[in-house]
Image: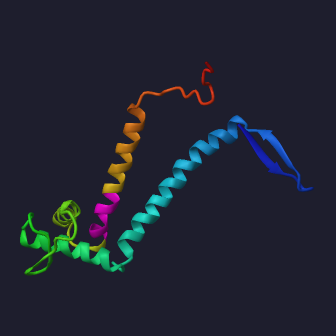
Amino acid sequence: MNQVFIDARGSSVARPMTADSSRLFRRAVPVLIGLLLLARLIGMAVVPLMDTTEARYGETGRIMADLNDWITPWFDYGVPFWGKPPLAFWVTAASFKAFGVSEFTARLRCRGLCYCRSRLGAGARRSRPRRRRSWGRRRMA
């Protein structure tokens, strides 16, 4: 792999990537991704629920956990909410039951489901057999 550098005159110069720079790159990227994820988790705990839909879905899960009614999502006590499928509310209510009621646990379902979805996608990509693509190699009869 070549790295392109700009010298003092403004022209680009391609230099091969050395083993040291490649090793540094392989170590630095996971550390940077980990720091970004840590900053995101801290932001989930510090920032209050601001969007109306985020607060509404959190409150629906809280009421579901409070009433122990895992069948009917409630918008408010006595007002059922049938606008969305209940899976997200079940996960939110389960996180409230497991970790307590807070902004962090209200957002935890989004991060958890996104993580599961990315792992499923990565697993499906790895389990798929590789096919060779022969674009432009058509036989002319």
Q: Is residue 138 left or right of residue 40?
A: right
Residue 93: quarter of image: bottom left
Hey, which quadrant is residue 139 in on the image? top right
Q: Position of residue 13 (x, y in %)?
A: 85, 45
Residue drawn at x 17%, y 62% is 90
Q: Quadrant of the C terminus?
A: top right
Residue 102, how many percent across, how many down?
Answer: 26, 73
Q: Residue lying at the far right in this picture: please name it.
A: 9
Q: Is residue 111 above or below residue 50?
A: above
Q: Locate residue 56, reporting x and y percent.
A: 25, 77
- The question of residue 110 being in magenta is answered with yes
- Between 126 and 4, the one lying in front of the other is 126
Residue that appears at 63% across and 29% down:
136
Residue 126, given in percent of the width and then of the height, sits at 42, 34
Number of marks present in the image shown: 0
Q: Residue at x 62, y 25 (%)?
A: 137
Horizontal arrangement in the rendering, residue 110 relative to residue 122 (left or right): left
Q: Identify the image quadrant of residue 123.
A: top left
Between 111 and 53, the one lying in front of the other is 53
Q: Is 122 one of the magenta-colored residues? A: no
The color scheme shown is rainbow
Q: Which residues fall within the magenta stretch?
A: 104-112
